[in-house]
Image: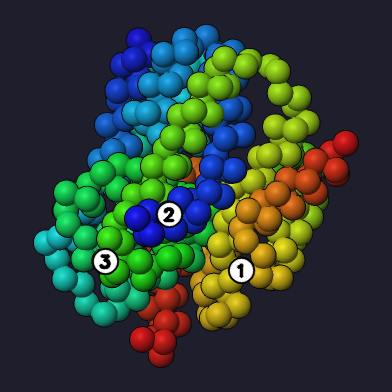
């Protein structure tokens, strides 16, 4: 039963992931489409960060915001992403003690 | 070998983000009654965090196969948009490499790769991406198994704090790009707002991210024009 669920989930996850490999192989895009696809990473990052970050600690949206601000500050200093991640984890940990 | 080493270093933050989340998945899956084999197999075959958490919840309450599979499709459709962007970025790479990379595409492996667009044009650039994707995949699998074995050993306070790791990584990837080009920040903020709006209207999280990404990304058609 669970194995069937896993198989079904696997199929519907794989298909959207690999179809673009064939599409891009066949097609050359117009410059505006390339600009659109070039903007997708930044748009995706935006959509993935907010509002999801608010719910890191349920019912305590302010903690997510503070953790995010700390991450922004550390990243602005030009430090490696590893330090950004560790700094944000520490912030949330201290705020939830 | 140099490219592979750089891939490992670049992919390292994904491991930091994935391990705690994967461990949490493993713990929850165990509590939902899944065996260690099923826990590991789901991570290897589905390899999509949000969908796995959702599936574990649905399995725990006894939801049917069709609902779980359809919900997974809806939640993971955003990878279609990301894959389209990624495959366009690595046009120079052979199809036999693009396929396994496509299989390993996640929000995180996409985000990290997309912030390093020039490697695809270099010699052996595929090794750079391959190492990022392999590190992410292995961390996810190992973390899941650890969670399944450890059960409740990890204090809730700490695992909850680690929930911010992936968001922090996304911020850590975005900020340097914004410092280089402020328009990139504008695209991200627009996409955030569209995402929030879609959720307010009543779209599911999965579709809200798809719409936020696709529509927010359209602003790039105009904003990135002068930069070419």
The spot of residue B127 in percent (x, y) is 32, 54
Q: Secondary structure at mark 2?
A: helix
The spot of residue A22 in percent (x, y) is 16, 53
Q: Quadrant of the N terminus of chain B?
A: bottom left
**Residue B197 visible from this viewpoint:** no
The spot of residue B9 in percent (x, y) is 50, 54
Q: What residue occupies the far front of the structure in this picture?
A: B1
Find out whether the residues at labels 3 and 1 contact each other: C-beta distance under 8 Å: no
Q: Looking at the image, is mark 1 or mark 2 earlier in the sequence?
A: 2
Instruction: Specify the label residue B123 is tagged with.
Output: 3
State the residue at coordinates (16%, 49%): B96
Disc 1 is attached to a residue of which chain?
B
Find out whether the residues at labels 1 and 2 contact each other: C-beta distance under 8 Å: no
- Dots 3 and 1 on the same chain: yes
Q: Secondary structure at mark 1?
A: helix
- Left or right of A16: which side holds B5? right
The spot of residue A42 in percent (x, y) is 49, 66
B78 over B223 or under it: above or below: above
Residue B17 occupies which quadrant of the picture?
top right
Instruction: Specify the label residue B5 is tagged with.
Output: 2
- Marks 3 and 2 sit apart, C-alpha to C-alpha, by 14 Å
- Marks 3 and 1 sit apart, C-alpha to C-alpha, by 28 Å
B34 over A96 or under it: above or below: above
Q: What residue occupies the far right of the structure in this picture?
A: A97
> Disc 1 marks which residue?
B175
B113 over B142 or under it: above or below: below
Q: Looking at the image, is mark 3 or mark 2 earlier in the sequence?
A: 2
Q: Looking at the image, is mark 3 or mark 1 earlier in the sequence?
A: 3
């Amino acid at each position: 039963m669970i194995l069937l669920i896993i198989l079904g989930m696997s199929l519907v996850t794989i298909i959207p992931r690999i179809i673009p490999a064939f599409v891009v192989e066949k097609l050359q895009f117009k410059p505006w489409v390339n600009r659109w696809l070039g903007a997708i990473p930044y748009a995706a990052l935006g959509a993935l960060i907010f509002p999801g970050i608010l719910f890191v600690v349920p019912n305590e949206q302010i903690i997510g915001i503070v953790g995010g601000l700390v991450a922004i500050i550390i990243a602005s200093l030009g430090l490696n992403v590893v330090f950004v991640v560790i700094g944000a984890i520490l912030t949330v940990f201290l705020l939830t003690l | 070998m140099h490219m592979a080493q750089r891939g490992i270093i670049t992919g390292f933050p994904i491991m930091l983000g994935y391990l705690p989340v994967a461990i949490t998945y493993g713990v929850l899956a165990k509590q939902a009654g899944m065996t260690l084999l099923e826990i590991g197999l789901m991570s290897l075959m589905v390899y999509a965090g949000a969908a796995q958490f959702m599936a574990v919840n649905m399995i725990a309450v006894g939801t049917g196969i069709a609902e779980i599979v359809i919900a997974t499709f809806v939640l993971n459709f955003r990878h279609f948009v990301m894959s389209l962007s990624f495959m366009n970025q690595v046009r120079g790479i052979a199809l036999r490499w693009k396929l396994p990379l496509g299989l390993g595409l996640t929000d995180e492996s996409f985000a990290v790769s997309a912030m390093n667009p020039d490697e695809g044009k270099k010699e052996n650039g595929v090794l750079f991406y391959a190492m990022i994707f392999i590190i992410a995949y292995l961390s996810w699998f190992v973390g899941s198994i650890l969670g399944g074995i450890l059960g409740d050993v990890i204090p809730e306070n700490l695992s909850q704090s680690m929930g911010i790791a992936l968001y922090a990584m996304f911020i850590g990837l975005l900020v340097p790009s914004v410092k280089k080009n402020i328009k990139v920040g504008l695209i991200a903020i627009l996409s955030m707002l569209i995402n929030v709006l879609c959720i307010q209207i009543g779209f599911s999280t999965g579709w809200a991210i798809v719409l936020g990404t696709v529509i927010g990304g359209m602003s790039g058609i105009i904003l990135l024009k002068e930069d070419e």
